[in-house]
């Protein structure tokens, strides 16, 4: 069955007696509008009930600086488009910024986005949460864009019924709802990326200059959302080859190749111009040899193993730069003007450092340099050791420094609803059992290419096992492809058709029920088969479960259940609990006791923060609230309860609070913050575990 035939069947059966009737464009438009309105309503009603997550705290202040200062020097870790969209309402709300720009976190040559975000919080403490809510409220626009593309692409292949099923899967996906409310780049890049690829697919169907122009501009906009969208520069040429091989007639291929080449040059040129315009052309034309890079991709070992690096307050660069230098320096490429903005290149370099990991030999070389042993530093820097240290990563109760190749497969298995999985697997099965022509196969390959490349690259080419959000971009293609089950089922007669149609509707209802059940805590969604969000131990942590989103909900619980009582707090987030004062009485909180060696001062370990309170000396009966991520042992920055210490004061080591795994929470706030009420017996039982020193940063 080819794509036009599938569409024809879907349309004809949609008007059959006893079935859903969507007569004409008006009925179709109303159905699409209803699904999108439901999606936006779910997202908006959810975002007002949670506070900013770990990454959002930095994204919003950085986005404000882009509008006000016309420079992208602050937090160029990802391209700026999504941040700028989110920040615009906050800019119009006129936050207090002048004293923030007077801080060293802005004036330093290497501005610290984390420190800048803390200054932003301090000077806007009275409406800090309101500013984030205001900015977040525009984010579902990306969900609407993505939904329209999912519907349009699926409809063009599988008819109105297929399009509506695909759109429903998108609109009621708990993961799209989770990230589509946040001031982060994941949902925005997902929506704009699939929009760009849809435009390129339309171009392949009917090549022309206008469609090439549209594809080029949208490709550039996708690059302005997230660096992971660079995969489109690899995927699109592959799709063009597929189209040539399967769709274009043999006698037209030579002429078509020439057309593709001309149009392709225009697409790439327009995408580069769009990127440059998105950065206000800042730093475009800077000679390549002038940049200070750190990643292995853009650097080479320093001749002799050691150099005097430029001054920097960035600890990562301070560790890398003495031993690595710009690979273009000293070559004929050094004077070549960069066709891309300087902060785009520097941000890409930072991302490469993140994906490559920190070479162990450079860590040892930096330690030797700190001891003044220059010979040892050179030897370590030039050693053949290629091992790296990456982020601590977690899966199924295990925390370690190296990832799992199957991490993202497992994450998808855990975090997609069972009903969605049934429809996706059904669409996979139809590829094997339904015959189709070459053009239809080309369409299916266009849907499969981005998911395949993203999943392969994240699983085998990086060691970043941090969250589903890193592969969120594959979901729209899976949902579009799932639309093919509709024309197939409505094309069956008798009992087979009866049960196939009910199976589709039942699967969709399962997905909707899963989303309704977890509302409004979409980040914490896990399907029933995985054990749900409250499984012990959790399947996943960090942005899959606990990203710091429930601090305000903890305050509400405290006001209702424990007001006035001291509560131990170890929070995985970047919001100082003192900011809760703007929402009412602040919790009376303290840092729970830590295991020996579990808490160190940030910065100079020999200089504790002035007038800091520090952790409690011993565990006592009473209330304690700990983020799930910290309970499972992830190291993190901890705030001090002293009113004189504003920024995070302590680094909690891995397993600093591991003894709380001995206890059962009496409450799970949003599934992400565990509340305990310890008795005298609990305290006595934990004494031995608390006294056990931390000897390793790995479990």
Image: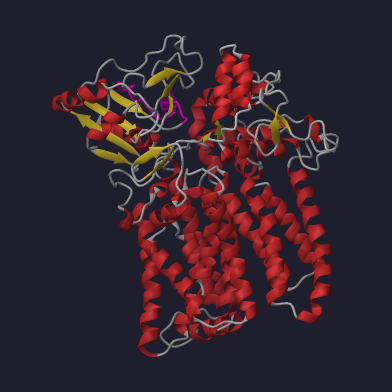
Percent x, y for residue 564?
27, 23
Is residue 238 one of those drawn in magenta?
no
| Front residue of this view, candidates 636 and 81 | 636
Percent x, y for residue 441?
60, 75
Tell me which residue sits at (42%, 46%) in the image. Answer: 544
Residue 267 visible within the image:
yes
Tell me which residue sits at (82%, 31%) in the image. Answer: 330
**Please, which colouring scheme is shown?**
secondary structure
Q: In this rendering, is residue 35 above or below 546?
A: below
Residue 34 visible within the image:
no
Q: Quadrant of the N terminus?
A: bottom right
Res 513 → quadrant: bottom left
Percent x, y for residue 316?
59, 26
In the picture as drawn, the residue positioned furthest to the bottom comes out as 494
Q: Which residues are magenta?
A: 574-593
Q: In this rendering, is residue 333 above or below 361?
A: below
Tell me which residue sits at (45%, 38%) in the image. Answer: 51
- Position of 500 with respect to 616 (left or right) is right
| Front residue of this view, candidates 306 and 154 | 306
- Position of 11 with respect to 532 (left or right) is right
Q: How many marks?
A: 0
Q: Quadrant of the C terminus?
A: top left
- Position of 606 with respect to 271 (left or right) is left
Tell me which residue sits at (60%, 51%) in the image. Answer: 189
Percent x, y for residue 525?
38, 51
In the picture as drawn, the residue positioned furthest to the left comes out as 681
């Amino acid at each position: 069955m080819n794509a036009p035939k599938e569409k024809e069947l879907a349309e004809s059966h949609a008007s059959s007696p006893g079935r859903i009737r969507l007569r004409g464009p008006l009925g179709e438009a109303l159905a699409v509008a209803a699904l999108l309105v439901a999606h936006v309503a779910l997202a908006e009603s959810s975002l007002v009930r949670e506070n900013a997550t770990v990454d959002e705290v930095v994204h919003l202040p950085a986005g404000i600086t882009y509008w006000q200062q016309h420079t992208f020097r602050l937090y160029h870790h990802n391209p700026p488009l999504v941040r700028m969209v989110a920040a615009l309402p906050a800019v119009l709300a006129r936050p207090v910024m002048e004293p923030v720009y007077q801080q060293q976190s802005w004036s330093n040559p290497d501005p610290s986005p984390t420190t800048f975000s803390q200054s932003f919080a301090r000077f806007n403490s009275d409406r800090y949460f309101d500013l984030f809510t205001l900015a977040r409220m525009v984010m579902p626009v990306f969900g609407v864009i993505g939904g329209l593309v999912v519907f349009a692409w699926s409809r063009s292949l599988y008819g109105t019924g297929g399009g509506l099923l695909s759109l429903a899967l998108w609109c009621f996906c708990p993961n799209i709802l989770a990230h589509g409310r946040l001031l982060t780049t994941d949902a925005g890049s997902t929506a704009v990326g699939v929009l760009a690829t849809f435009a390129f697919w339309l171009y392949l169907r009917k090549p022309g200059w206008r469609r090439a122009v549209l594809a080029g501009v949208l490709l550039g906009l996708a690059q302005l959302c997230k660096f992971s969208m660079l995969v489109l520069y690899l995927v699109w040429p592959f799709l063009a080859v597929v189209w040539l091989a399967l769709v274009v007639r043999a006698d037209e291929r030579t002429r078509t190749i020439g057309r593709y080449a001309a149009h392709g040059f225009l697409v790439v040129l327009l995408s580069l111009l769009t990127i440059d315009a998105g950065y206000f052309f800042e730093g475009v034309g800077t000679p390549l040899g002038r940049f200070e890079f750190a990643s292995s991709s853009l650097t080479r070992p320093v001749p002799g193993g050691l150099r005097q690096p430029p001054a920097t307050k960035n600890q990562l660069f301070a560790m890398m730069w003495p031993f690595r230098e710009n690979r273009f320096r000293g070559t004929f490429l050094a004077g070549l003007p960069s066709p891309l903005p300087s902060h785009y290149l520097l941000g890409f370099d930072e991302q490469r450092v993140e994906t490559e990991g920190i070479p162990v030999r450079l860590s040892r070389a930096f330690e030797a340099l700190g001891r003044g042993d220059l010979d040892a530093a050179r030897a370590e820097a030039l050693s053949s050791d290629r091992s790296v240290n990456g982020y601590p990563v977690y899966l199924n109760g295990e925390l370690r420094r190296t990832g799992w190749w199957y991490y993202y497969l497992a994450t998808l298995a855990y975090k997609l609803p069972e009903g969605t999985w049934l429809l996706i697997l059904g669409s996979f099965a139809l590829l094997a059992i339904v015959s189709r022509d070459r053009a239809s196969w080309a369409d299916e390959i266009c849907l499969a290419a981005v998911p395949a490349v993203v999943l392969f690259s994240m699983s085998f080419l990086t060691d970043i096992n941090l969250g589903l959000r890193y592969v969120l971009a594959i979901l729209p293609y899976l949902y579009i492809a799932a639309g093919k089950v509709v024309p197939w089922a409505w094309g069956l007669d008798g009992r087979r058709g009866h049960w196939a149609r009910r199976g589709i509707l039942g699967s969709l209802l399962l997905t909707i029920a899963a989303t309704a059940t977890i509302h409004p805590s979409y980040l914490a969604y896990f399907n029933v088969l995985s054990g749900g969000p409250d499984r012990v131990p959790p399947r996943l942590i960090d942005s899959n479960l606990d990203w710091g989103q429930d601090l305000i909900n903890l305050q509400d619980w405290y006001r209702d259940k424990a007001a006035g009582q001291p509560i131990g707090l170890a929070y995985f987030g970047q919001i100082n609990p003192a900011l809760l004062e703007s929402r009412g009485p602040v919790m009376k909180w303290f840092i729970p006791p830590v295991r020996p060696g579990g808490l160190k001062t940030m910065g100079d370990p020999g200089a504790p923060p002035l007038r800091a309170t520090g952790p409690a000396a011993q565990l006592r009966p009473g209330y304690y609230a700990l983020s799930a991520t910290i309970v499972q042992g992830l190291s993190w920055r901890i705030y001090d309860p002293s009113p004189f210490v504003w920024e995070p004061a302590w680094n909690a080591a891995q397993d600093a609070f591991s003894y709380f795994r001995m206890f059962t929470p009496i409450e799970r706030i949003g599934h992400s913050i565990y509340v305990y009420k310890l008795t005298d017996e609990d305290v006595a039982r934990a004494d031995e575990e608390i006294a056990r020193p931390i000897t390793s940063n790995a479990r």
